[in-house]
Image: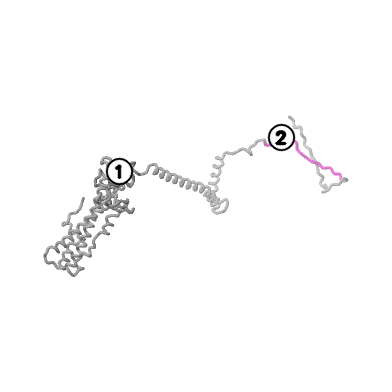
Amino acid sequence: MADIYNTEKIQIPENLPKVLTPNNNQNIIIEKKLYGSDGFRNNLDLSFSEINKSDPKKNIDNFFKDYDELFFDIPDEGEEKSHRAILEKSGEYLNIFAQKDVEIEKLEDQIDELQERIDELENPEEHPFYKNGTIISIDKGGSYFYMDKGKKRPIVGGRPGSVYAALKLALGFKEDDDDYEMNIVKAVPRDIINQIDNGPSFDKEDLGGGLPLRPKSIAVMLDPSDFRANPDLYNSVKEYKVQLENEITQAWDLERNMENQFFKYSNDLNTLPDGPEKDRSRGLREEAREELNDARRKLAAYKIIYQRIESGDEISIEGLSELYDNLSEGDFASQRSNTQQFNG
């Protein structure tokens, strides 16, 4: 179709006054272009490219491409358009997720703790028939066990021992109360007791809720004072004999205590399943063995000196000092031939 529109012009005189009055007539020419259908299509862009959505990935690719090219041109510092600004803005963005991750981890830990507590309430470490705190024995025998965390712990010394005597009083019973008539101890058939898992020995420190004392710690408390057994500190044999008797009594206590410790840990090694408790008992037994041998060497030396005093032979304090020096040389090591080493 032919273009049916024409070009019209409106001309404005060059000397046109700013304000026109009714009597002031001037010709004004105005020009405008009018397009037909063909001219409209040929002269104007009819596409919608300006509002088309671009590919986000392509924009990100272009961004990093431009970033790489402009990397060394970007200023180091600055509130905007700098490496510092990019770093801070990205850091703020990432920190949001880091904080959320920390919160999620804390919540997960709390869930795990709550689940453990639920498991403990639903499945307590307790025997279904013999509750924790119950004392049981094998058919009214002298070997007593204390139930703790679902395991039977041999009471050191059994029925006549000092540990059970203290435990009995701690439970509110009198010393002469009958163990079975008063239902203090439950008699259990051997085949049933053998099915109950073993725990470590129950000793005096368990009554106080403290940690077990190591053999070395016990030895420090019970070990007789070597210097008091030295005759050089005394002026007469009679005076020295009194002090030596005290030292022999202490040495006996130390020897018996170390022997009990050794047998206690030996029993644990024979009854405990493989694991940390058994490994600990093995180390403590070796420690008790060393202390026991030392106590026996010292006791043997004291007894030799005491027997010399009681022999009826004339002996001076100087002679006892010489004997003591010979026996105590090398921390009583010379007595290894006079007393049997305890190897278990």
Q: Are marks 1 and 2 in contact (CB under 8 Å)?
A: no
**Among the two numbered marks 1 and 2 on one chain, the one whose residue lies closer to the N terminus:** 2
Residue 197's disc number: 1
Q: Is residue 125 magenta?
A: no
- Neighbour class for label 1 at 10 Å: few (<14), some, many (≥20)? some
Amino acid marked by disc 2: Phe
Residue at position x 53%, y 47% in the image: 93
How far separated are the C-alphas under marks 1 and 2?
100 Å
Q: Which residue is mark 2?
A: 40
* Front-most of residues 89 and 176: 176
Q: Is residue 88 left or right of residue 315?
A: right
The location of residue 71, given as percent across then percent down, is: 53, 49
Q: Is residue 339 left or right of residue 98?
A: left
* Front-most of residues 335 and 184: 184
| Picture quadrant where residue 140 is located | top left
Counting every numbered tag in the picture gives 2
Outermost residue to the left = 313
